[in-house]
Amino acid sequence: MVNIKRAYDPVSDEDGRRILVDRLWPRGVTKERAHLERWAKELSPSKELCVWFSHDPNKWPEFQERYRAELAPQMDNLKELAAEAGKGTVTLIYGARDTEHNEAVVLKMVLEEFGS
């Protein structure tokens, strides 16, 4: 099972393994407060893609395509993460304010496609 959650939301026992998928550490969140299993920078979108997207909902469809293209070389890491999610809950942690248009939403879709 794959969930997504903002880094600023309270930690919960239901979160399972918490993995940060942002390229940058969330502002104002301490390592202790984050309760992360790990920080998967390799699965985060490039700086260039983030700057281009700027969380503009009008760019969302193209952001998804570009981000998926960036994830293609990370197939081994994606398969490993999907396998972890098959064994228990994995929560993808992100810092964006926009809960509908962010990298964790896309990454969750990609991981769930492995289970299809």
Image (cartoon, grey):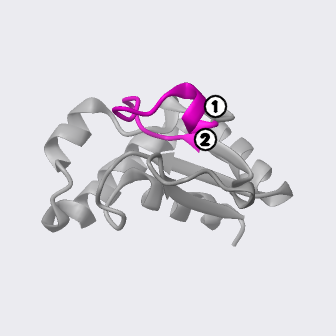
Residue 5, numbered label: none
Q: Quadrant of the N terminus?
A: bottom right
Residue 87 x %, y %: 85, 56
Magenta residues span 19-35
Question: Magenta: predominant secondary structure element?
Answer: loop
Residue highlighted by disc 1: 38
Q: Hey, which quadrant is residue 81 in on the image? A: top right
Q: Earlier in the sequence, mark 1 or mark 2?
A: 2
Residue name at image x 80 percent, y 59 percent = 86
Three-letter residue code for mark 1: Arg
Query: Label 2: which residue?
Result: 19
**Residue type, mark 2 in image:** Ile
Give the x, y percent position of residue 90: 69, 53
x and y, in percent, of residue 34 in the image: 56, 37
Query: Which is nearer the eye, 99 or 9?
Result: 9
- Tell whether position 28 is magenta: yes
Looking at the image, how many numbered discs can be counted on the residues? 2
Residue 34 drawn above or below residue 53: above
Give me the residue at 44% from left, 33% from top. 29
> In the picture provided, is 80 more to the left or to the right than 103?
right
Q: Which residue corresponds to the image point at 37% horizontal and 32% vertical from the top-left?
A: 28
Task: Report the side of 106 relative to 58 (left or right).
Answer: right
